[in-house]
Image (cartoon, helix red, strand yellow):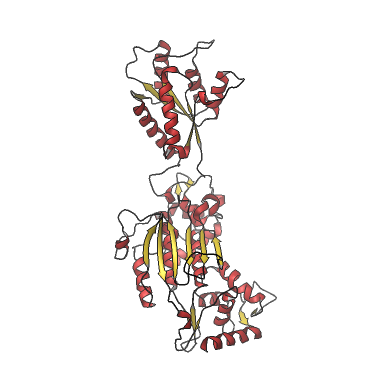
Amino acid sequence: MVPQVNIFISSVQKEFSEERLALRNWLRNDPLMRRFFEPFLFEDMPASDRRADEVYLDKVVTCDVYIGLLGNDYGYEDAEGVSPTEREFTEATVQHKTRLIFVRGDDDRNRHPKMRALIERLGKELIRRRYVSTSELIAGVYAALVHYLEAHNLIRNGPFDAAPCRNVTLADLNEESMVNFLHHARRARGFPLPEDSTSLELLTHLNLIDEGRLTHAAVLLFSKQPQRFLISSEVKCAHFHGIEVAKPIPSYQVYKGTAFDLVDQAVDFVMSKINLWVGTRKAGIQVPIRYEIPREVVAEAIVNAVAHRDYTSNGSVQVMLFTDRLEVWNPGHLPPSLTLEKLRHPHPSVPANPLLAEPLYLTKYIERMGTGIGDMIRECRKAELPEPQFSMSDGFFVTTIWRKLGVSTRKTTGEVPGKYRGSTGEVERIVLVIRGEMKRVEIQKALNLSHEDYFREAYLIPALQAKYVEMTIPDKPRSNRQKYRLTEKGLLLQAELIKREKS
């Protein structure tokens, strides 16, 4: 939610009636200003049984920004000979408010002596801006307020992921996630920091700290609850039985977590719904698995969406699986240097979120040189799939990956094709791949799944509960020597599934 900044425009002065109304109307109608600022004019107040000086001074206390307009007249003087304008400025100074002072005209000779003295006093305390016309005043206020927004990190010139994230502290980050990152980055890309590096050393090395404040990228990569700070950073996944969005939706999930979690969960969601083939073990101990859409293609489409999306958008990444295609919708636009046509040819990498993209590169989620889309096209060709399509729609970049129509009836020598639907689909898949006794990581690897929690919740636990699979050490479920095997019931199901698909 955009924080609202209250602006107090200096109290009633007849010579500024036009400028004050123009400022208020402009602040309420300008597309940028109205997102952040709420102006207050004294004459907007309803009738009240309070002294006027109490009201306007209270408003100065509660405002964030004070805009003072100074002209020729000093204005009404109270019993102490001080005008409301000078009282307001003094109170704004005492309250440490942001003070923006605009002086009408260049000639001070015709000003009231006290106004000249006030202008001289202000000149010693801050920078004043002079103006001649109302349009010039608005331009000056605009420049000053844009500077205010930049200084308070409410708008930015650089990438969103490099800007500090409000209210986040080191205590909001997950220490274990950073330790795991160090381990994987060192193995994957030879990351130079040693594994015993501190969190602060890691964050500093990755440029995830800006003047002592954690950036949005730090939150997206390592926060315990990233969506607490960046609500729309979640990924929504849906599976439809037809070729268009329609109810009922057989499966719908909203995934939260770090960028790594989002990619792994969304990819595993798709892999659990598309067709697979389970081969024989003639070539070795490992049971071969082949998916209808190569995992590399699915992962590239989803990781691109998570890494390069516009995180200022209220939209979320959407992953939608239909009977004929997979669509990945990514809030945002292509950078100016790229076009849809250029994407299909060698092109430079232009990450929208460079600080987010770098750790994803270091853990081999993405490649740095802009080769991902070319790899997707080649993998689809190898799998005898149509080339992916790329398009723009209503502020979203859309990647469409086509499936093979009628693929569930195709037979391949030595393989068992299968199209599994319903709540038992994941259970049937785990039953098909288990051979003898296997560790959890071996089963997960056989199914080409990355996210441990997703595998446990969607595959392993349901299979255990249905008594198709059992533990080899049931009295020590967390043992590091734990393995899993099919029960007699599971072996019967496996034989039935193979027989069903071969018939």
Residue 40 percent across, percent down from the top left: 50, 28
Q: Is residue 359 something one can see in this rendering?
A: no
Q: Where 461 falls versus 214 (above or below)?
A: below
User: Position of 211 compared to 465: left or right?
Assistant: left
Q: Say which residue appears at 53% left-offset and 54% top-offset.
A: 226
Q: Where 441 falls versus 491 (above or below)?
A: above
- 443 or 503, nearer to the observer: 503
- 90 or 279, nearer to the observer: 279
Q: Where 168 falls versus 265 (above or below)?
A: above
Quarter of the image holding residue 21?
top left
Quarter of the image holding residue 20?
top left
Q: Say which residue appears at 44% left-offset and 17% top-offset.
A: 14
Residue 399 percent across, percent down from the top left: 40, 64
Q: Residue lying farthest right?
A: 475
User: Position of 449 compared to 133: left or right?
Assistant: right
Q: Where 448 falls versus 265 (above or below)?
A: below
Q: Say which residue appears at 36% left-offset and 30% top-offset.
A: 140
Q: Say which residue appears at 42% left-offset and 65% top-offset.
A: 301
Residue 37 percent across, percent down from the top left: 47, 35
Q: In the rendered picture of this protein, how many numbered marks are placed on residues?
A: 0
User: Position of 304 compared to 60: left or right?
Assistant: left
- 375 or 194, nearer to the observer: 375
Residue 400 percent across, percent down from the top left: 41, 66
Q: Is residue 135 something one can see in this rendering?
A: yes
